[in-house]
Every structure is written in structure tokens, then in C-alpha cells.
Amino acid sequence: MDPGNRRVLLVEDEQTIADVVRDYLLKAGFQVDMAADGFTALKVAASRQPDLVILDRMLPGLDGVEVCRRLRQTMSVPVIMVTALGTEDDRILGLEMGADDYVTKPFSPRELVLRVKSVLRRSVKEFAPEPSVEAAGLELDPASRTVTHNGNPLALTVREFDLLAFLMRRPNQVFSREELIKAVWGWDFGDLSTVTVHVRRLREKIEANPTTPELIKTVWGVGYRFDDTGGGHGRQ
Amino acid sequence: MDPGNRRVLLVEDEQTIADVVRDYLLKAGFQVDMAADGFTALKVAASRQPDLVILDRMLPGLDGVEVCRRLRQTMSVPVIMVTALGTEDDRILGLEMGADDYVTKPFSPRELVLRVKSVLRRSVKEFAPEPSVEAAGLELDPASRTVTHNGNPLALTVREFDLLAFLMRRPNQVFSREELIKAVWGWDFGDLSTVTVHVRRLREKIEANPTTPELIKTVWGVGYRFDDTGGGHGRQ
DNA sequence: AGAGTTCTTACGGATTCAATACGCTTCCCC
DNA sequence: GGGGAAGCGTATTGAATCCGTAAGAACTCT
């Protein structure tokens, strides 16, 4: 995600910090609005409709937590909370309040910009349709959840599709069964043979000869890898 | 994050400190460039494109703050600032200046290495593939776990791959069997002949003539060393 | 020449993966 | 509801692979 035309509202009462951070955001290509207290923040947010809000927790007037709460009542903008407090409890509290990320002072403006980009990436992804992938004669379209092999459609199950999608998006990269079960299944633990079996079933459908796979290679002692040897960079 | 093939630029005018820190970074697997003053630092940074810069604040010529500012104008490399001053205000000032972390003298080189790793971890994307290494006709790609010798792929086992990766990332450095078994196997003790045998098996696959090895040299009474005699600095 | 170090080979055990089978749940259509 | 099919996760078996150790040969340095 590039900063492009994104608008960030920076709510911070300490002028020095505010200036430095604003410069960094501008340099990174964002448009920046500023507010020094809670009420102004809400007013500016309503009128400018920012794509993201950076919110100091200590503010004159309404404090950050309250501003966050009220923002959430009227709009669904992502919020990054900035605070001088750094305990674990505070962090959890901040996130529970509805902040999408949490930064403690003193912080590096560079890091803050990275987090802004990361949060925006996350929140943009949720709505943007994912592009389809193409590799090795296989075309996978997440929007319609269809896969074709040299033109003819394949009937994949949910798991099979998700697994293939994950691998095709990251061709030529090995993933352990643990990584796969975490990424595709969303589990933190579980029987890893689940992955083995699903790879097997997937191969049965996409490989010309499932016994000697050409697409999903097994890397002994490590995991699996989708091989995209050739030509076309897959992106529609 | 493991050091992979990351390149660090170390800017430090005190030779003793510089040497110690460089050794630690090398041991940790980083590639290290060095500069002793501000102007050299900028020049080296431009040509080598490091993944991170360690910057002493007190420097002859341009001081650290100024170097940091100028770096930031042209590239977006993370910076760790090293300084003799240690007050809280300085720390904040340093971070506000754009440093991503801040270390005060006297510092432990070990801690510095940890911070380097931490900063890199933050600035690197989650599934970003580690850069591959190339040396002496050999190309090793950690992401796909493949190795090619002048283009044709080699079939290495897990141990062989890990061993080769470790050595190739630290070319021209000798490692004892103890160090290798600790780093590659993760053991604190064990039969050292394990290393010997695996080096042998590895040579069988990568050396033109395994009996008179050109790549993995044995240093009698000490250990093994991967020789990168030639030209190209290994970076994909 | 001798002691210490490294090379080389061989082998049994352990790990890993493929392949199949089975029970459970879900969904659909009757 | 009820029968049946399909998908999923787990367990089991068997085979291929890899790994660590041992033990003797070859080598290096003094």
C-alpha cells in the first residue's frame, strides 16, 4: 500500500513531537491534519474523514480513550494510540479500547510511520478484492473462488482452495506444516498430518502425476513449496 | 529474525570500539561495512545500500545527527544511534531525530547486536523472503531452500543446507566444530565427528574434486572455512 | 617415527512422508 | 425428518530418506 492520497489525522498536544511526526508523515507521502485537543480532534475527524487517526492518550479536554470511543460511534476509522505509559496492562487496555495499534513514548517516528502503513494495509485489504494469481498453467481467482488448469475448471474444496491460494501467492517459498496450519487453518496447534493429507488430496487434483509432483514439491524435513519455474508473473 | 545476508554499515571513529563491534556483527552473520567519519559514511551508504546503519553521534566532520538527517533525505534505512550522552532527554531527542533505536556508551556489543536484530525485525515484512547468497558459482536461496551450482540445482539435505548456508553467509571466517555444531545443530555438546561427516558429504555435492576442496577448506587443528576468493559481493 | 587430527566408509536407528482407511460432521435433497 | 453424499480430521501402515556414531585409514605436524 502506498501512502498515495491517504489522509492522516494527528492528535497530539506537545508541539515538538507533533511537528516531528508531521514531517515524517508528509515525507512518507501522507496528507496530514492536526489537532491539539480532543474536541478539535472530533470536529476535524468529522469534516475531513481521515483514513487513519494517530491519537495521544493524554490530551487536554477529552482524553484519548474517550476520543477513540466517540470516533468509533460515528465512523470506522483505524486508530493508533500513542501513550507515555508502557506497561502491559496499558497496552491491553488500549487495544481493548478499539485502537488498532499502540505505540509508547518515547517512540521513533520512523517506527510510527511503519505502523501507520501497516495498519492501513490491514484495513484496506479487508475491502479490496484480492487479485487473481496465475502460475504454471493454473489460474486461481479468489473473488469467485475458482481455479482453472489450462482453461478447464477444477472442483476444489474450501481447504484445498485456501491452501493452494496461500502457496500460489508465495511461489518458490518453503513453508513448514506448522506455518501452513497456522496460516491456512488459523490454528496455533493441531495435528500436522492434516496438512499432509490435504496436500495429498490437492495434488490428486492439480498434478498430472500426483506421485511425482511438479507443482507442490515436498522439501524433505522442512515442508512444502509451490514451484513457479517459468515465465509469466502471475497477476491479472 | 536471523541475520541472513543483511548488510550493516558501522560508523565509528574509535578504532578499538569499531573492531570489537564489527567482530560481533560478523559472528552474528551480518555483512559489515565500516566508515570512520560522516562523509565517508554517506558515500559508503549510497554505494552499498546497507539494511541498517549504526551511527556514532560524535564524529569528525559531520556529526551523527547530521549524517542521520542526510541519510534520511535519500534513503529509508533504519538507524541505531550510539552516544556517550545518556540522559532521558537525549534519548528522546535521538529518537525524534529519526533514529530507530538509541544506545549509550559504554554499551555491550552483545546488546547492540540484539538491538540490530530487533530493529531489523520491526522493519522487515512478515513473509519477506530472506535474501539469497551467492559466491563462487554457488547460489543459495533460503526462501525456496534451493542451491544451484553454475545454474544446475543441487539436492541437499536439511543439515547440509543449513551448514552451507551458515558458512556462505560468513565467508572467509574459520569456525571450529564446536561453534558449528552449536550454530547449525543447536546443540551445546555432542559428537564433533558429526560435523566432520557432514562437511564431507557436503563437499561430495558441491566440490569439483572433494578430495582437494576449493570451497570449504579445512583449517588444520582449528575447523572449517568457506572461501569466497572472488569478485562479486554476495547479494542477490 | 609418532601422536594427534582429519578423512572416508559403512550401518542401524530414527525420522519423515505417502497412501489408505475410518469415523465424524455438515449439507442437501427427497 | 431421514438417507446419503461429500468434506474433513485423525490414525495406521509401510517405505524411503536421512542422520549420528563408530572404526579404521590417511594425513599433518613436530
Image: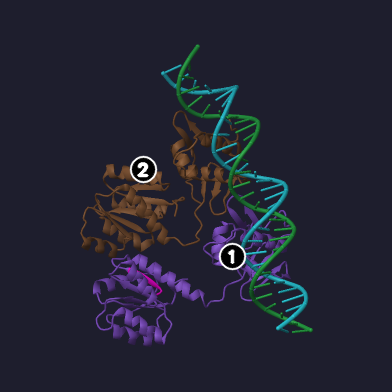
Chain colours: A purple, B brown, C green, D cyan
- Tell me if residue A18 comes above or below residue B167 in the rendering: below
Residue kind at label 1, given as amino acid type: Phe
Residue at the spot 35% in from the left edge and 55% down from the top edge: B115
Q: How many marks?
A: 2
Of marks 1 and 2, the one in the foreground = 1
Location of the N terminus of chain B by quadrant is: bottom left
x, y percentage for residue B70? Answer: 32, 60
Residue behind mark 2? B23
Residue behind mark 1? A166
- Tell me if residue B36 comes above or below residue A13 in the rendering: above
Dot 2 surroundings within 10 Å: few (below 14), some, or many (20 or more)?
some
Dot 1 surroundings within 10 Å: few (below 14), some, or many (20 or more)?
some
Contact flag, marks 1 and 2 (Cβ < 8 Å): no
Q: Is residue B98 left or right of residue B128?
A: left
Q: Secondary structure at mark 2?
A: helix
Residue at the spot 53% in from the left edge and 61% down from the top edge: A189
Say which of B17 and D23 sits in front. D23
Tell me the chief SS of the magenta region: strand
x, y percentage for residue B17? Answer: 28, 44
- Tell me if residue B157 comes above or below residue A101 in the rendering: above
Q: Is residue B81 left or right of residue A203?
A: left
Residue at the spot 60% in from the left edge and 32% down from the top edge: B209
x, y percentage for residue B90? Answer: 22, 61
What label does residue B145 carry, if any? none
Q: Which residues are magenta?
A: A99-103
- Give the chain letter at badge 2: B
- Give the chain letter at badge 1: A
